[in-house]
Amino acid sequence: YDSVLKDSTPGLFLSVCALVVGGNSFPIDFSFWKNATDKIGWKGKRNKNFKSKVDQAIELITAYKDLILFDYVAMDGAYSSEKMLEFLYSKKLDYTMRISCDRVVVINKKQMKLKYQPALKLIRNERCKSASGHYKGHACTFTVNKRKMKSGRWEVVFIISNMKLSAKEHVIAYARRWAIEKMFRSMKQYLGLKDCQMISSLKQRLHIFNVFLAYSIATVEKIANKKKSVEEMLKFWRNSKLVQKFCQTNDSAEA
């Protein structure tokens, strides 16, 4: 949505793979995502090269699961599909994901929507609770979490996982994914992730990977300099006389 034009405009969607280490997020790779129907040209024409978000996520995980050491895969609710579960269980990967409250699951031999499952009903001041069950034929653990939003209101979310953890540990495991959301915010607001106007797919990819690299370097420097956030590290660089001198004397910077 373009706030200046006050209308929707064509754009790019990204499926991003990132590594979270100690609360710090490092972007690894990405793929472009498009709608199933291509609205450019004949309206409603199906894109022959269409890949769903789940398909792209599976490709990214497959590409890096043997190259990078990690404990588990964390994804938002858009990926909690039967196809993704089949993939994760076939590769014996631990995972944690958001799942819609309207999904029908089996807990204690009771088949009903998550939000109606008696085993997940929070009592009094309870903030989280877990119960073992099955979803799409796979054994898993469901966790309900009541959390406070920035607005001050409360919301109830559900998490699905195959890890053997307590309810509180399941909430913490999924919450580690928040570092990726903060990464997107920093890359968009401070590093120009969404500001490239190039039409060429190759140039867009180069721009995005350069943003990934800049964010990763800033994260490493943030840790080394004991800064509170990547944004603080970027502001420090911008105010640094060394950076200003580099920009004045470096040929590549002037170009």
Image: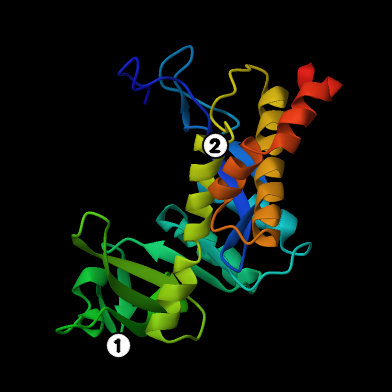
The image position of residue 22, as x and y in percent, is: 60, 69
137 shown above or below 78: below
207 shown above or below 85: above
Q: Which residue appears at 37% of the width and 22% of the height?
A: 2
**Which residue bears the numbered disc 1?**
108
Q: Which residue appears at 65% of the width and 41% of the height?
A: 237
The answer to which of 171 and 250 lies nearer the viewer is 250
Hey, which quadrant is residue 97 in on the image? bottom left
The image position of residue 126, as x and y in percent, is: 23, 83
Query: How many numbered marks are there?
Result: 2
Furthest residue toward left = 124
Hey, which quadrant is residue 157 in on the image? bottom left
Instruction: Give how far apart the Cα atoms at labels 1 and 2 are.
Output: 49 Å
Q: Which residue appears at 26% of the width and 78% of the height?
A: 127
Q: Is residue 83 left or right of residue 128?
A: right
Image quarter (top left, top right, bottom left or bottom right) of the C terminus? top right
Task: Judge whether residue 240 can be spotted in this image.
Answer: yes
